Image: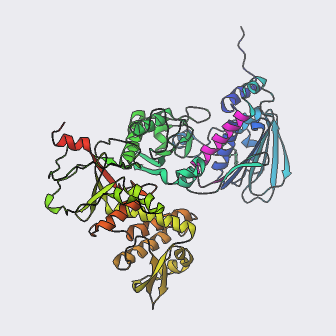
Amino acid sequence: MTIKKMPKKVIERIAAGEVVQRPASVIKELVENSIDAGAGRIDITFIDGGINYMEVSDNGSGITKEELPLALQRHATSKISNAEDLNNIRTMGFRGEALPSIAAVSELTVISSAEGADEAFLYKVSGASKGELEPAARGKGTTVKIEELFYNVPARKKFLKTVNTEKRHIISTVKSLALSRPDITFSLNEEKNNIFKYTSSNLKERFIVINGKKLWDKVIEVKFKNPFLKITGYITTPEVSYSNKSKISFMVNDRPVYSPLIFHALMHGYRAYIPPNKYPAAVLNLEIEPAVVDVNVHPTKKEVRFVNQQGIHKIVSTVVKNILQNTSAVLEIDEPADIGGNNFKSRPAKEVFRKSSFNRRPSGFPRFGNIDPGKVTKFTFSSAQRSSSTSDGDKKTARLAGRIVPRFQLLKKFIVGEDERGLLLIDQHTAWERINFEKLTKQYRDGSVHSQQDMFPEVIELTPDDAELIKGNAALLDRFGIKVENFGPGSFKIVSTPVIAGKESGGKETIIMIEEIIALLGEYSSSPNTDDLSNKIIETIACRKSIKAGDSLNEKEIKTMIGELMHCRVPHRCPHGRPVIVRISEDELDKRFDRK
Ligand code: ADP
Ligand code: MG
């Protein structure tokens, strides 16, 4: 056998095989280049699963005439210049391999107009032959067209799956790139048909747009930070489950990655909360020092390796578990605790609180303190079930309310009640916050927020900046039923506010509410995300306009509250994520009284 050096063409083709496995991998490389070029918008078009045609067009920085031929040379990159840079990779690309590899197995055309240049150039290469440069027309940015993929590698072409399979790979690749950069507008087209267009947004909205609008109130924000690692993202509540993993994606330093480690950690966190063989939707971005994560494991940079694999696993699973624990439908208390007082006359309710569709046993929940029997205001409720036979509309309300039988108010803070599984404690403030949040959201969406003129308007002093914010956003505030009028220099009258809780408005809370809304207007003044802003405004109003701890509630008010709560889509959590209902199960009570 004679050993010979391989011809350059053969080397190129072998290398191309590593980067370019299928049309979706070409699109991934091209889109990553567009992201690295600072594009705000990326348009992707393919025909026949990308096998015959793919095009990625961006409005990024472009490539100059001089650099066009260079961009297509192996190991030519504008992104790193020395070995140290490898320890600090912030761009998607850095290997300088993608374009030459793709060009080695297709016909590649780049048309680009660089920042500041007033002309565009086209450069076309085929099978890594030397290309030709010619003038072209386009605005700032770059378009890369790929035709006849694998025309010169029949073996590889044979391995391609059906057009539909390749199309599915393209869609999922672009979706995960779009999740990694919600600030960029992405549009994906199959020939002339638009498959999707995601306009520039934030992560939460993009996550929901990609995975289904019905997730809107079923996503929980993930936020974690220690000196080495920051985790941000969204996961779904345990009510949501899918039979496959397709709605789970991870990023490391904003780069979409495939990571069995993070996946395992996520599922570990969900273990007690989701049935076996079911999966949540999730997007997690791990931000970590580039020095302790190796993105260079794989030529397509899809897999990553962490210096401390175990540490990452533990943190991810604990963060997920803790979040789910705090958002359980009804928090169950099952830790040995010393509940004083034994004057709970247990009278099992016939109806069940069906909204809690899962029964979980979180551990580590804070102990339930002593109840001072002296502070229990006693009065009995006529059974909620009994009042259920009036009109049809009433019937529904009463039936739902019947699932929790309210008993009495405790410490002017909680409502004590029961369902067939045990003792319930309901936080009157978070309950009303949830009720008002959902009502106001609906009214706001329908453009029908009920507002009331305040008889004795509160007066608020505002700085000129804040006054501008109020004036500039008068139309928006009007949609929330809020009117603030100028009343002498620096003084403003709060003329009307929304009525939602049936609670008298006015007073200090109204002033605080307006101050908080002004702060939000300031915070969002340069952000295009109006949905996020209106959501936060609704949260603020719902909080400030809700019954508080310390407010006495009579029997009728308690009943109304429970009835309203049962109509909520997410009755178990307030908009800020605090629990509304805590249950001590009958089992648990039996244990405490040595009945078991
Ligand atoms: P890498 O991304 O690893 O640097 P590539 O082969 O993908 O290698 O690209 C080579 C070079 O071509 C990049 O470093 C960049 O300078 C330039 N380039 C490629 N695509 C674009 C684009 N869409 N916009 C601007 N420059 C680009
Ligand atoms: Mg690249």
Q: 311 or 191, which is in the foreground?
A: 191
Q: Quadrant of residue 358?
A: top left
Residue 175: x %, y % from top left:
62, 45
Q: Residue at x 36, y 60 (%)?
A: 387
Q: 180 or 265, which is in the foreground?
A: 265
Residue 425: x %, y % from top left:
28, 55
Number of labels in the image equals: 0
Q: Quadrant of ligand 1?
A: top right
Q: Residue at x 76, y 24 (%)?
A: 158
Q: Residue at x 53, y 70 (%)?
A: 525
Q: Residue at x 66, y 32 (%)?
A: 19
Q: How is the image coloured?
A: rainbow
User: Is residue 533 something one can see in this rendering?
Assistant: no
SS majority, magenta: helix
Q: Is residue 471 left or right of residue 186?
A: left
Q: Quadrant of residue 320?
A: top left
Q: Is residue 569 magenta?
A: no
Q: Is residue 577 left or right of residue 1?
A: left
Q: Residue placed farthest to the bottom in the image?
A: 488
Q: Is residue 173 magenta?
A: yes
The part of the chain drawn in magenta is: 164-187
Q: Is residue 363 above or below residue 206?
A: above
Q: 165 or 10, which is in the foreground?
A: 165
Q: Is residue 177 above or below residue 542?
A: above
Q: Is residue 548 left or right of residue 262?
A: left
Q: Is residue 334 above or below residue 553?
A: above
Q: 494 or 587, which is in the foreground?
A: 587
Q: Quadrant of the C terminus?
A: top left
Q: Quadrant of residue 12?
A: top right
Q: Quadrant of the N terminus?
A: top right
